[in-house]
Image: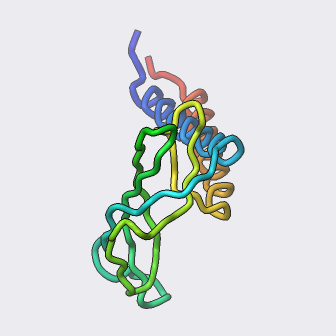
Amino acid sequence: MKINWGRIIIGIVGLLFSIYALLLISLTFFGVETEANITSYRQEYGERNETIRNQYTYVFGYEFEVNGKTYSGNGQRIGNSVFIKSDNTHKISVKFLKCCPYINCDYKAENHGLTSLIFLGIGIVLIVISRKLVSTE
């Protein structure tokens, strides 16, 4: 019996997309919102090659406390050319799962709903494709 590695890899990638989407959905509906301090902030690469000029990608790190323990995370945003230097006074909203605060994300409500649905759709399509592939014997 020959193992169809393509089918297995496509199925695993689809499963990972689905798990990530379910984590985003659980953060959206069951996550606890809190404020976090930005600990690092840097511009990634140069100006974005888009129709809207003066757009840059910024990557940042943040920390927040839950029950006396400090948890951290990171995020990414698109902004203009104004660069913020991190001095631990800038705050952002983050959501985390109460049972395991290390599962957290920078929270913007308008982004997570659509992102979750797209990732879940991609995951389901990949799983269906992997199930339909026939092994060549």
Q: What x and y, as percent, mark residue 74? A: 40, 55
Which quadrant is the C terminus positioned in?
Answer: top left
Task: Say above or below: 86 vs 126.
Answer: below
User: What sort of colour scheme is used for the picture?
Assistant: rainbow
View extreme (bottom): residue:
53
Q: What x and y, as percent, mark residue 34? A: 58, 53
Q: What x and y, as percent, mark residue 75? A: 43, 59
Quarter of image, res 49: bottom left
View extreme (right): residue:
29
Q: What x and y, as percent, mark residue 32? A: 64, 45
Q: Is residue 66 left or right of residue 32?
A: left
Tell which of 92 and 18 is nearer to you.
Answer: 92
Q: Is residue 32 left or right of residue 3?
A: right
Q: Residue at x 56, y 44 (%)?
A: 96
Q: Residue at x 48, y 22 (%)?
A: 135
View extreme (left): residue:
45
Task: Say above or below: 59 vs 31.
Answer: below
Quarter of image, res 26: top right
Q: Is residue 113 left or right of residue 62?
A: right
Task: Say above or below: 92 vs 48.
Answer: above
Q: Residue at x 56, y 35 (%)?
A: 19
Task: Say above or below: 75 vs 32.
Answer: below
View extreme (front): residue:
68
Q: How many marks?
A: 0
Quarter of image, res 1: top left
Q: Residue at x 39, y 79 (%)?
A: 56
Tell which of 30 and 63 is nearer to you.
Answer: 63
Tell which of 17 and 2 is nearer to you.
Answer: 17
